[in-house]
Image: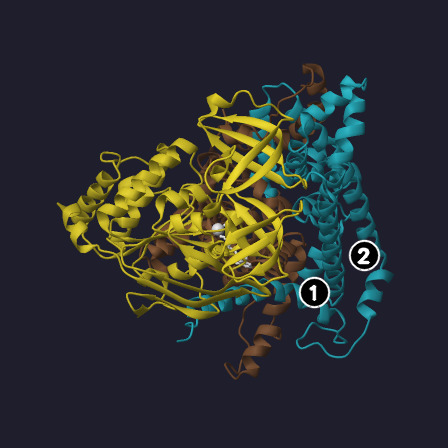
C-alpha cells in the first residue's frame, strides 16, 4: 500500500547546477560546471579518476560547500543548506549500512530521524525492503548479507522517505560483474517505478551508456560534453570525448581547403574530399586535424560510398560476436576494425594486406593532433 | 548566500585546544620555573639563572642517582629488547601451543598494579639479596618493559614475509644466518625504537624503584620523589626540564627510526 | 582460544622454527616472567592467607575495619572520578584527532603522545607547582580578582583526581581514537543525508560504533588508577589515603606484611578479574602511540 502511495507522491525534482566551482587550495576540483537536470531524469557523471565527479555529487548532497556557484533543487537554493535538511537520497560506494543496527533499523533510520512512530517506521521499512526484493531480511545484521544484498538495502534506505532526488557515487563498483548487471536493471526499474531524479557517478562508460538518459562527460573539473548516449557515441563534440567513449581510430590529417566540402591530405599522400558535415569543430585551411572513425564502421573490401584504405594486418583476434582486425595504414598509424560474422573470414592471416571501406558518414573531423 | 559558519566545529575546536593546553601546560610550565632566581617555587618566576642546573650537576647525590638510573636503563633496554625479540620471533615463526600462555603472561605486567609487583619484589629481593642492586632493578624493569618491546616487535616481524627467510635458506643460509642477514636488518629500526622505549620506561620508572631502592642505592625517580615529598626545591624543575628534553629526543629518535623502517 | 583476528597476529605461514628452537628462544622470557613477576605476586598471595597461620583473618581485617573499608571505597571512587574526567576530556580530543589532517593532526598527536613518554614524577611535580599556595593557579585566580585568599588546592582529593586524569589521559584518548578511526567517514555522511542532525548522527551512529574504544580506554584508566601510587602519595593528604598509599604505609612504617599482602591481594584479584571479564575489549597493542 505504501509503495503505491510512494509511486504517486515521489515524483522527481529538477536540479540546476550553475557555474559550480570548488577549489581545494591550488587544486580546482570543479571548474565552472553547469548542468540542468529535468524532473525524473537519470543523469550519469562520467569521467576519469580525479575529474571532479565525486566533488560535484558531494556539493549536491551538501557535504562540500562550493567555492562559488549555486545548486537549486526545484528552484529552491540549496547551495549552503546542511545535508540533513536537503531531503535527498544517497547511495554510497561501500554500502555504509550501520553495522550496529539490524537491516530493518537501517532502512527505518531516516524515518526515525523524521520523527515517525515505531510501528509506521517498521511498516514502511518492510515495504521498502520488499521493493528491493529483500522482504523478510529485516532482522539480519548487515554483515550477514552479501555485497549485492547490502547495496540493495542501502537503496531501500535511500528511497524509504521518498526523496525527490537520488544520488549515487559509484554504487556498483564494489560488486562483481554479474551482480553489477543485475543491480543496473534493479536501479533502472526503481527509477521507472518511482519517477525519481537520479544523479549517478561512474567511471564505467558502458554502465553510463546503458543506464542514463543523459551523460555528462567530465575532465579536470570541466564538462566536456553532455547529452544522450547515442549523441555522445555517434558524434562526440571534441577529441577527448571521442577518445574517452568507446573505441576510436584516429588519423592525423592536414586541412587543405574548406568550402562546400572539405579536402584533407592524408599522411600517405592521398587527398580525400569529405562532406562539410564531417567537421565537428570549425576548421580552416592549413590547420592540422584529426580524422576519427569507429572500428565497427569499417567494412572489409569495397562497398558503400566512402574512402578505401589498405591495411597491413598484424593481429587477428577472435572476439566472439565479431572479429577484431588490427593493422597499420601505409604511414604506420594503427587501425582497428571490428567485423561481425567472423566465421567467413578465417582465411585472413597476420601479414596479409586487406582493404577496408570507410563510409563517408562514419568520418568525423576534429581540430588538432591526436 | 554565504556558507554558514560552523558553530559546532568551532566549539569542538575550542574545547579540544583547551584540553590540549591542559595536557601540555603542566609539562611546559616547569621550563621557565627552572630558570627562576626565586629560592622557593613561586609563580611567576623571576630573573634568569642556571644555578639550579649547576646545583643538580654539582650534587654528588643527584649525580649518583642519575648514574644508577642510566646504568639500569641501558641494561634494561638491552635485556628487554633481546629477550622480547627472541620470544616474539619464536611466537611468530615457531610451532607452539604456548601462544595463549604467552599472551596472558605478557599482559600481566600491564594489568597487575605496579604497587603489587613492587611489594612482591621488595619481599622477594630482600630474601635473596637483590634489593637495591643493579641486577635487581634491571630484572624488575625488564619485566615492566617486555610487553612494549613485544608489541613493537610483533608488529614489525609480522610484516616480514616468512618466505624471505625460506628463500635465504634455499640459498644455503642456516636458520640463524637467515634471521641475521635477512630478517634482522629489516626489523632493526623497530628493534632500536623498542630499545629506546624500554630505556625511557626504565629511566622514569618510579614505583618499583621506590620500593627496591636501598638507603644508598637510589634511582633518580626515587630521589626526585623524596625531594618533592619533603622540600620541593627548585632543582626539581631543572631536572624535570632535562627529563622532558630527554623524552622529546627519544620520541624524535623513534620517529626517525620509524620513517626509515622498511617494514613500516 | 583467542579470536581469529588476534591469533593470526602471532602466526604466519612459511617455514616454521623447530619445536626445540622455539622453546630455547622462549625460555628467557618465560624464566624472567616466572621468577620476577609470577613468583613474587604468588608469594604475596600465599602470605596473605598463610601468615601468621592459615586464615582469612587478614582479609577480614580489610573488610571489617571501617577505616580500611573507607580507603577501599575512596580508591574506587577516585578511580571512577578519574575515569569520568578522562572520558569527558579525552573523547572530544580523540574525535578531533580522528578527523584532523596534516599539520593539525601531527600537532594533536604530539600533544597526546609526548606526555605518555614523559615521567610520571615530572607531571606530578608540575601539578604540585601549579597547585601550591603561591602557584600558577592561585596567582591567576588572584590576579583576575576571583579570590583574595589563595585556595588550598594541594593535598586535596581534587588535586589527586585532576593530576591522575592528566597522567592517564593518553590511555583514554588512544583507544577511542583507534575506534573512531576505524569508522569510515561515509557513515557520518550517510546519516546526515538520511536526515540526522549532527547531534543525532553522533548519538545514533558515531557513539555506538566507538563504544568499544570508550570501554577499552575507560577500563585501562580505571584499572591503572586503582593501583596508582605516586600521584596520590605526593598530591593527596594522609587523611585521604588510597589503597596503594595504605600498602606502602603498612610495609614501611607498620611492617605488617600479612595485612599489606592482603591489601595487595584484594587489589590484584579485583583488577585481574575485571581484566579477564573485559579481555575481549582491552586492546593493549594500541598503546604504543601508533597514532599514525
Ligand atoms: N578533500 C579534498 N582535499 C583536497 N583535494 C581534493 C579533495 N577532494 C578532492 N580533491 C581533489 O579534487 C579533484 C577531484 O576529485 P574527485 O574526488 O571529485 O574526483 P572523481 O572524479 O570522483 O575521481 P574518482 O573517479 O577517482 O573517484 C582531485 O584532483 C582530487 O585530488
Ligand atoms: Mg569519486
* Quadrant housing residue A207: top left
Which one is nearer the viewer's eye here, B249 or A66? A66
Q: Position of residue B192 (x, y in %)?
A: 76, 41
Q: Chain of mark 1?
A: B
Mark 1 and ligand 1: say if the CB distance to the nearest ligand atom is below 8 Å: no
Residue tagged 1: B232
Residue at 65% in and 21% down: C14
The answer to whether marks 2 and 1 sit on the same chain is: yes
Q: CA distance from mark 2 to mark 1?
A: 14 Å
Q: Colour of chain B?
A: cyan
Few, some or many residues within 10 Å of mark 2 (<14, 14–19, 20+)? many
Q: Position of residue B144 (x, y in %)?
A: 66, 39
- Tell me: residue B244, above or below residue A121: below
Chain appearing in yellow on the rendered image: A
- Tell me: residue C166, above or below residue A346: below
Residue tagged 2: B62
Q: Which mark is residue A238?
A: none
* Quadrant housing residue B247: bottom right
Residue at 34% in and 35% down: A182
Looking at the rendered structure, the secondary structure element under dot 2 is helix
Amino acid at each position: 500500500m505504501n509503495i503505491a502511495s510512494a509511486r504517486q507522491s515521489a515524483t522527481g525534482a529538477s536540479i540546476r547546477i550553475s557555474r559550480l566551482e570548488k577549489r581545494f587550495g591550488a587544486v580546482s576540483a570543479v571548474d565552472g560546471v553547469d548542468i540542468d537536470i529535468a524532473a525524473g531524469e537519470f543523469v550519469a557523471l562520467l569521467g576519469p579518476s580525479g575529474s571532479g565527479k565525486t566533488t560535484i555529487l558531494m556539493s549536491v548532497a551538501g557535504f562540500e560547500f562550493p567555492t562559488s556557484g549555486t545548486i537549486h533543487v526545484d528552484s529552491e537554493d540549496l547551495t549552503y543548506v546542511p545535508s540533513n535538511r536537503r531531503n535527498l537520497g544517497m547511495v554510497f560506494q561501500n554500502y555504509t549500512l550501520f553495522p550496529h543496527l539490524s537491516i530493518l533499523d537501517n532502512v527505518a533510520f531516516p524515518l526515525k530521524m523524521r520523527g515517525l512512530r515505531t510501528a509506521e517506521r517498521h511498516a514502511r521499512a518492510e515495504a521498502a525492503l520488499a521493493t528491493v526484493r529483500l522482504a523478510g531480511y529485516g532482522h539480519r545484521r548487515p554483515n550477514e548479507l552479501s555485497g549485492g544484498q547490502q547495496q540493495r538495502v542501502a537503496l531501500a534506505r535511500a528511497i524509504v522517505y521518498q526523496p525527490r532526488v537520488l544520488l549515487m557515487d559509484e554504487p556498483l563498483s564494489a560488486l562483481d560483474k554479474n551482480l553489477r548487471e543485475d543491480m543496473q536493471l534493479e536501479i533502472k526499474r526503481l527509477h521507472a517505478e518511482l519517477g525519481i531524479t537520479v544523479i549517478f557517478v561512474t567511471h564505467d562508460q558502458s554502465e553510463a551508456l546503458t543506464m542514463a538518459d543523459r551523460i555528462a562527460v567530465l575532465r579536470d573539473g570541466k564538462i566536456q560534453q553532455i547529452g544522450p548516449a547515442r549523441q555522445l557515441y555517434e558524434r562526440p563534440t571534441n577529441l577527448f570525448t571521442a577518445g574517452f567513449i568507446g573505441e576510436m581510430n584516429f588519423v592525423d590529417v592536414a586541412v587543405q581547403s574548406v568550402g562546400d566540402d572539405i579536402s584533407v591530405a592524408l599522411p600517405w599522400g592521398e587527398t580525400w574530399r569529405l562532406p562539410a558535415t564531417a567537421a565537428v569543430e570549425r576548421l580552416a585551411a592549413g590547420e592540422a586535424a584529426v580524422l576519427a572513425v569507429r572500428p565497427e564502421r569499417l567494412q572489409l573490401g569495397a562497398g558503400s560510398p566512402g574512402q578505401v584504405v589498405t591495411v597491413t594486418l598484424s593481429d587477428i583476434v577472435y572476439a566472439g560476436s565479431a572479429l577484431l582486425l588490427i593493422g597499420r595504414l601505409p604511414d604506420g598509424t594503427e587501425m582497428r576494425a571490428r567485423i561481425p560474422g567472423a566465421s567467413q573470414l578465417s582465411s585472413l592471416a597476420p601479414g596479409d594486406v586487406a582493404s577496408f571501406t570507410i563510409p563517408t558518414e562514419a568520418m568525423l573531423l576534429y581540430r588538432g593532433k591526436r | 548566500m554565504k556558507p554558514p559558519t560552523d558553530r559546532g566545529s568551532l566549539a569542538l575546536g575550542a574545547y579540544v585546544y583547551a584540553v590540549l593546553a591542559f595536557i601540555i601546560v603542566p609539562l611546559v610550565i616547569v621550563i621557565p620555573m627552572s630558570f627562576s632566581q626565586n629560592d622557593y617555587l613561586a609563580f611567576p618566576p623571576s630573573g634568569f639563572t642556571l644555578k639550579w642546573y649547576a646545583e643538580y650537576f654539582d650534587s654528588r647525590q643527584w649525580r649518583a642517582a642519575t648514574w644508577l638510573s642510566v646504568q639500569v636503563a641501558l641494561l634494561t633496554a638491552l635485556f628487554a629488547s633481546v629477550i622480547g625479540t627472541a620470544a616474539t620471533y619464536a611466537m611468530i615463526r615457531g610451532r607452539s601451543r604456548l601462544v595463549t600462555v604467552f599472551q596472558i603472561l605478557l599482559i600481566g605486567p600491564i594489568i597487575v598494579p605496579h604497587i603489587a609487583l613492587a611489594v612482591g619484589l621488595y619481599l622477594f629481593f630482600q630474601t635473596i639479596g637483590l634489593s637495591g642492586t643493579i641486577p635487581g632493578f634491571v630484572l624488575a624493569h625488564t619485566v615492566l618493559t617486555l610487553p612494549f618491546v613485544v608489541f613493537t616487535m610483533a608488529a614489525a616481524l609480522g610484516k616480514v614475509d616468512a618466505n624471505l627467510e625460506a628463500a635465504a635458506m634455499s640459498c644455503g643460509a642456516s636458520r640463524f644466518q637467515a634471521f641475521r642477514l635477512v630478517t634482522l636488518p629489516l626489523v632493526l629500526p623497530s628493534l632500536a625504537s623498542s630499545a629506546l622505549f624500554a630505556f625511557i620506561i626504565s629511566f622514569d620508572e618510579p614505583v618499583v624503584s621506590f620500593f627496591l631502592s636501598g638507603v644508598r642505592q637510589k634511582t633518580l625517580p626515587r630521589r626526585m620523589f623524596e625531594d618533592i615529598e619533603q622540600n620541593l626545591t627548585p632543582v626539581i624543575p631543572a631536572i624535570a626540564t632535562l627529563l622532558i628534553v630527554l623524552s622529546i629526543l627519544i620520541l624524535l629518535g623513534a620517529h626517525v627510526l620509524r620513517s626509515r623502517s622498511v617494514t613500516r | 582460544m583467542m579470536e581469529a583476528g588476534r591469533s593470526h597476529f602471532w602466526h604466519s605461514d612459511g617455514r616454521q622454527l623447530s619445536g626445540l628452537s622455539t622453546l630455547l628462544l622462549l625460555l628467557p622470557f618465560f624464566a624472567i616472567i616466572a621468577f620476577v613477576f609470577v613468583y613474587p605476586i604468588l608469594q604475596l598471595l600465599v602470605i596473605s592467607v598463610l601468615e601468621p597461620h592459615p586464615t582469612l583473618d587478614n582479609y577480614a581485617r580489610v573488610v571489617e575495619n571501617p577505616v580500611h573499608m573507607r580507603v577501599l571505597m575512596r580508591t574506587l571512587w577516585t578511580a571512577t572520578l578519574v575515569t569520568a574526567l578522562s572520558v569527558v576530556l579525552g573523547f572530544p580530543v580523540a574525535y578531533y584527532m580522528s578527523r584532523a589532517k596534516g599539520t593539525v593532526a601531527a600537532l594533536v598527536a604530539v600533544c597526546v603522545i609526548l606526555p605518555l613518554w614523559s615521567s610520571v614524577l615530572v607531571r606530578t611535580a608540575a601539578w604540585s607547582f601549579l597547585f601550591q599556595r603561591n602557584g600558577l593557579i592561585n596567582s591567576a585566580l588572584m590576579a583576575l580578582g576571583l579570590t583574595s585568599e589563595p585556595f588550598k588546592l594541594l593535598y586535596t582529593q581534587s588535586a589527586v583526581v585532576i593530576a591522575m586524569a592528566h597522567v592517564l589521559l593518553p590511555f583514554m584518548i588512544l583507544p577511542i581514537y583507534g575506534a573512531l578511526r576505524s569508522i569510515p567517514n561515509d557513515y557520518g555522511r550517510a546519516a546526515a543525508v538520511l536526515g540526522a542532525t549532527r547531534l543525532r548522527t553522533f548519538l545514533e551512529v558515531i557513539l555506538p560504533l566507538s563504544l568499544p574504544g570508550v570501554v577499552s580506554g575507560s577500563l585501562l584508566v580505571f584499572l591503572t588508577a586503582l593501583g596508582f601510587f605516586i600521584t596520590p602519595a605526593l598530591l593527596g593528604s594522609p587523611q585521604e589515603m588510597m589503597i596503594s598509599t595504605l600498602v606502602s604505609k603498612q610495609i614501611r612504617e607498620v611492617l605488617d606484611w600479612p595485612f599489606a599482602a592482603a591489601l595487595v591481594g584484594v587489589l590484584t584479584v579485583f583488577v585481574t578479574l575485571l581484566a579477564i571479564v573485559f579481555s575481549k575489549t582491552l586492546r593493549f597493542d594500541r598503546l604504543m602511540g601508533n597514532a599514525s
